[in-house]
Image: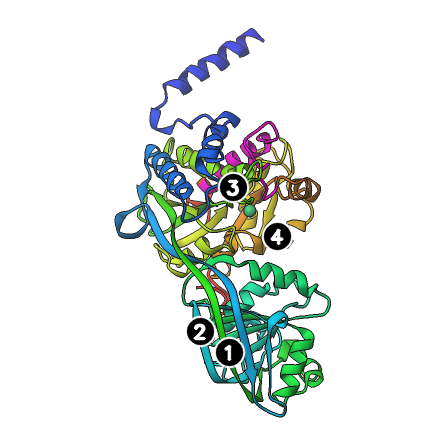
């Protein structure tokens, strides 16, 4: 017994005498994460809204922490930043007129139009009905085919079919706008409370401000759509029922449409923060780790007892993990591939910062062998099973599963997390063909996640760095992500799968 102990301690002292470079750093602790969550979620950071003083403080903090961990700037022009523009647009007045079988017009309560600029007019444009406005080349769906939508007013349906992977309405609007439509008019069906949708849209919203914004985006209720389509010489029944959705082809109606709209437009600039840890090899490849830094800022009206949505869980926790992972990977054995650290802006307004990066990447998208997103990680206790979101990437699943097992954790047996895949930044990269995943305990147990989403803290002033933070699971997830990132950064252990069919990836 004693002999064994003596032998073991001899081995231990040998291990200590081994070269310093190979020493693995001590794992990340709850105190490490809290050290970042506290300032990021403090009132001084004002809820980290894009384009505000809160942004300036937040991005300065992230740069300082990245720098201290030996990262190099990897944004634009040798800086840490990639800037993009956002705009808050609030619809004011609008009229939509049509010619055809029964000329007419919509205005007032049956029409809300958001213009790209403060004053937009469109005269005598073609009118196209495009079902859901979906384009899914991998499934042979192209509902915009069959009509020339360039410069047209395109009608699409708000609700999509309950099919996994069917693009949400915001993405379908982008698709139609990208095809060159002058106006995207969304028909809100009778199953959706029109008054509520109208009021939400009327309040206005902070969104991306780029070419993807249509000159006009509008909503109308079903009854108004019926009047417009019939009046313009179409037949609603036939448009809805004659063609199956999967092979639907857009239909041009006989009438023409004119629109006038005024909109209040306020523009602002915001930034992604990007750092790079140089790998020991020259592979020209990288693993990208990302987390969104932004939150909702002042989210309650003046006079409210607490106006600041601090976003401790959402997503100071993910940024804290990102910073600590940078520290882990920059010490000990240097990864072979580069590791890119991307702190995104404007996730809360629709994955805008991540989407901008995907559309204007600072490294070729094909050089990203895998991306791991971290969002809302501080809600699960230690020992929570690990869910993999967006699994099914060849080579990636097995590597993640064996790393999870090596960490002494278990995999979540169900696939409930898949329902959330389009609601996180990794999706912006995944839809461009980058193998992207989230790995962790905070979305393996839907009861746990549901409790956070529905107990009044989510997107509310109560998401603060207080006693309600659960960091034990976050610590496990952070250390697990370090281990996964290390393996992904090693060409001997992982290669990005080549796309099997043309067009399915970059
Ligand atoms: Zn959020």
Which comes sooner in the sequence, label 3 or label 1? 1
Residue 145 point in image, percent of width and height: 54, 81
Local secondary structure at mark 3: helix
In the displayed structure, does residue 35 sit left or right of residue 247?
Answer: left
Residue 232 point in image, percent of width and height: 61, 88
Check residue 465 for magenta coloring: yes
- Which residue is depicted at the point 60% across and 71% down? 108
- Which residue is depicted at the point 38% across and 49% down? 271
Q: Which residues are the magenta region? A: 458-485
What mark, if any, has residue 315 been given in the picture?
3
Which comes sooner in the sequence, label 4 or label 2? 2
- Residues 257 and 28: in front is 257
Confirm whether residue 93 shows in the render.
yes
Toward which corner of the image does residue 71 lie, by quadrant? top left
Local secondary structure at mark 4: helix
| Residue at mark 4 | 420
Which comes sooner in the sequence, label 2 or label 3? 2
Which comes sooner in the sequence, label 1 or label 2? 2
Does the beta carbon at disc 4 come under 8 Å from ligand 1?
no
| Residue at mark 1 | 259
- Residues 263 and 43: in front is 263
**Disc 2 to disc 3, C-alpha distance:** 37 Å
Query: In the rendered view of the protein, which quadrant contains the N terminus?
Result: top right
- Residues 293 and 393: in front is 293
What mark, if any, has residue 120 been given in the picture?
2
The mark closer to the camera, 1 or 4, is 1
- Which residue is depicted at the point 61% across and 52% down? 420
User: Do residues under tags 4 and 2 come within 8 Å of each other at their CB atoms?
Assistant: no
Does the beta carbon at disc 2 come under 8 Å from ligand 1?
no
Which comes sooner in the sequence, label 1 or label 4? 1
């Amino acid at each position: 017994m004693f002999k064994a102990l003596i032998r073991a301690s001899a081995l231990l002292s040998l291990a200590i005498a081994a070269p310093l470079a190979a020493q693995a750093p001590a794992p990340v602790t709850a105190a490490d994460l809290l050290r970042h969550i506290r300032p990021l979620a403090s009132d001084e950071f004002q809820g980290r809204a894009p384009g505000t003083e809160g942004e300036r403080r937040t991005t300065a903090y992230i740069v300082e922490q990245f720098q201290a961990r030996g990262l190099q700037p990897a944004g634009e022009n040798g800086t840490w930043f990639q800037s993009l523009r956002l705009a808050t647009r609030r619809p004011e007045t609008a009229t939509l007129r049509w010619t055809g079988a029964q000329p007419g017009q919509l205005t007032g309560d049956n029409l809300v139009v958001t213009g790209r600029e403060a004053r937009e007019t469109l005269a005598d444009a073609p009118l196209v009905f495009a079902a859901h406005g979906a384009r899914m080349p991998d499934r042979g769906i192209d509902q915009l085919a069959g009509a020339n939508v360039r410069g047209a007013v395109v009608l699409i349906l708000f609700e999509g079919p309950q099919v996994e992977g069917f693009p949400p309405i915001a993405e379908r609007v982008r698709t139609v706008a990208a095809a060159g439509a002058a106006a995207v008019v969304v028909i809100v069906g009778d199953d959706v409370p029109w008054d509520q949708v109208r009021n939400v849209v009327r309040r206005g919203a902070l969104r991306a401000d780029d070419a993807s914004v249509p000159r006009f985006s509008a909503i109308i209720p079903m009854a108004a759509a019926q009047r417009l389509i019939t009046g313009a010489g179409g037949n609603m029944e036939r448009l809805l029922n004659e063609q199956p959705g999967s092979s639907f082809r857009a239909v041009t109606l006989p009438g023409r449409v004119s629109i006038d709209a005024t909109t209040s437009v306020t523009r602002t600039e915001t930034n992604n923060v990007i750092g790079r840890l140089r790998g020991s090899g020259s592979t020209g490849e990288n693993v990208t780790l990302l987390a969104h830094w932004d939150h909702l800022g002042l989210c309650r009206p003046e006079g409210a007892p607490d106006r600041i949505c601090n976003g401790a869980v959402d997503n100071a926790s993910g940024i804290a993990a990102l910073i600590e992972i940078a520290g882990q990977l920059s010490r000990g054995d240097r990864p072979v591939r580069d590791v890119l650290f991307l702190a995104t802006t404007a996730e809360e307004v629709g994955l805008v910062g991540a989407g901008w990066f995907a559309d204007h990447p600072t490294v070729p998208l094909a050089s990203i062998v895998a991306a791991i997103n971290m969002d809302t990680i501080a809600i699960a206790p230690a020992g929570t099973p690990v869910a993999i979101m967006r699994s099914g990437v060849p080579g990636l699943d097995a590597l993640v599963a064996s790393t999870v097992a090596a960490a002494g954790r278990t995999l979540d047996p169900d696939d409930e997390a898949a329902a959330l895949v389009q609601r996180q930044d990794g999706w912006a990269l995944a839809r461009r063909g980058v193998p992207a995943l989230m790995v962790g305990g905070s979305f393996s147990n839907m009861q746990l996640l549901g409790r956070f989403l529905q107990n009044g803290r989510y997107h509310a002033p109560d998401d603060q760095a207080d006693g309600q933070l659960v960091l034990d699971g976050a610590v496990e997830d952070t250390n697990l992500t370090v281990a996964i990132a290390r393996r992904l950064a090693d060409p001997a252990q992982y290669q990005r799968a080549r796309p099997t069919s043309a067009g399915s990836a970059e």
